[in-house]
Amino acid sequence: MLTFFINRHLVRADEESPPDANRLRLSTNAFQLLRHHCHLSVSFTNALANVEYPSPMCFPSRATHNNLNFWFFLPTRVQVRCRDPKAHVKGKSQMNPINYLHLDAPNVDVRGSKIALHFWVDGGGRGSPKAVVVNFQDGRWRRVVEEPIFRLRDSYQDCESRRLGRDPIYLQMSVFNSALRWWNNSLSSVDDQLIAYEEALLRQDLAAGGDLLQLNAKTNRSLHCIAAHLQRYDSELQLFSNILDQTRSYNLTCHRHFVHLLFRRSEQDLDWVLTALGRVESMLIVLRTFREELQQKASNVMSLLVDNNKGISDQLVVQTGIMMHKILETSRDQAKESLNIAAQTKQLTEQTAKVLHETQKETEASRQLAIQSQRLSEEMMKDSVAMKTVALVTVLFLPGTSFAAILAMPFFTGDSSPFDKPDLIWVWVALTVPATIVCFGFYLAWKQRETRRREQRVSSDDVELSMITQTSQS
């Protein structure tokens, strides 16, 4: 049997993925030739173009020698080693079952894909059967993509004759067995993750409080993602079961035609075919039961998570109550301290009022003292005016009387007074007038000097007072 395997670019370990790695390794012209050579049906071609839609299949409703063709799209789930554990955080949503599922505990990604299989044979016995297998799995998982090829090669090597190798059961079993192994590994990884979550929840110390709430929120998101994927796995495994039932019916109804075409020898081969399909069916039943157990386990883990969150919430309520009690006690103590401070403040206010009252009294006394000082200053000014008047009169008469007394001395006149001689009066005038003028001049100069000194002192006091005022304002 001529079998064509079409897949995406297979990436080696030391090779980077090319830009078109997600495309099938098949050009447009090559696909047209393949379609014509292998007699690909239009419905199969349309299904290839819409691979993201629900997986279709087509088996003959009534087997005839001209109608032995079939095709189907088998959904698969493969667990592969996670290369970037942080990629799922910023990548596609894990809640969408179409996307891959990241599992932290086993550090794997469960990725979904499909394998399309088309089989055509000429019922008239002209030419060999032709099969096309389109593997849509990522080329980075080279060993996974090549597994059906190696299984089919080993099956052909075990065939007793080349003609018996044209039986489509070998191709069907190669794809089914690979898919069963992938499904088993994927569900086992999900089981490992659920066990890890359950053990972590059982080990949780509820007294940790708020730190666990954030961790449990992440666990809750992961559990909901797992539950959504398990629900999708149920529909895909159901489709797998439907394909298997159709394959069993196909082999039963087409057996006599395969014997006629010498693909099979006798009823013994049919028993072998049905036995092989029975093993696949039993394994598929086990996987579906396993999936149901995982669904129930996910629900149990969610219940345990809810119980833990409730326990944590209760612990937080208790801790909050204790903290509130401590806060109330602290507030009560602070209230007592505030009352004491208020009483002390009241006493201080009363003492301050007394001090202010005494200060007012002192201020009033100072004001009265200032008034008395002002009155004293006025009286002193009056005395000063009187004294100045006396001084002026003294200055006016002192030179004349002084010189008169001097000239009246005997050593100037002998025995007689100088006034006994009127012709000598000019001497007294000549001495008295200049002396009086000199005294008045000295008095005026001394007064002007004192006035200037007083003005300088007043101006310096004003400057110092203004500087003090500016400093206090700044």
Image (cartoon, rainbow, N blue to C red):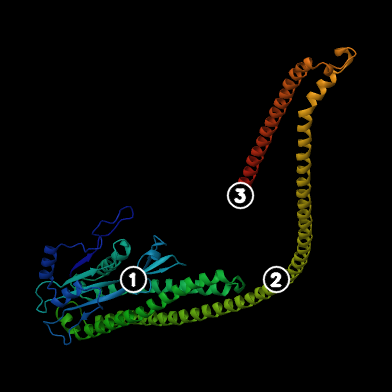
- Pinpoint residue 43: horizontal percent, then vertical percent: 16, 78
Residue linked to disc 2 = 330
On the image, which quarter does residue 456 sit in? top right
**What amino acid does circle 3 point to?**
Gln
Q: Secondary structure at mark 1?
A: loop
Q: Is residue 432 above or below residue 143?
A: above
Which of discs 1 and 3 lies nearer the camera? The answer is 3
Query: Sequence-wise, which precedes: disc 1 or disc 2?
Result: 1
Instruction: List x then y, in percent, for residue 162.
Output: 19, 69
Between the residue at mark 1 and the residue at mark 2, the CA separation in whole angstroms equals: 55 Å
Quarter holding residue 137? bottom left
Give the labeled residue for mark 1. 99
Measure the C-alpha gap from mark 1 to mark 3.
Answer: 75 Å
Dot 1 or dot 3: first in sequence order is 1
Q: Going 33% across and 55% down the picture, which residue do you hit?
A: 13
- Quarter in which the N terminus is drawn: bottom left
Front residue (pair 454, 33): 454
Relative depth, front residue between 226 and 15 = 226
Q: Secondary structure at mark 2?
A: helix
Q: Residue at x 13, y 85 (%)?
A: 64
From what the image shows, is residue 393 above or below residue 93? Answer: above
User: What distance separates the C-alpha of mark 2 from that of mark 3?
Assistant: 43 Å
Q: Which residue is mark 3?
A: 473
Q: Does residue 151 appear left or right of residue 40 in this picture?
A: right
Q: Disc 3 on helix, strand or loop?
A: helix
Q: Amino acid at mark 1?
A: Asn
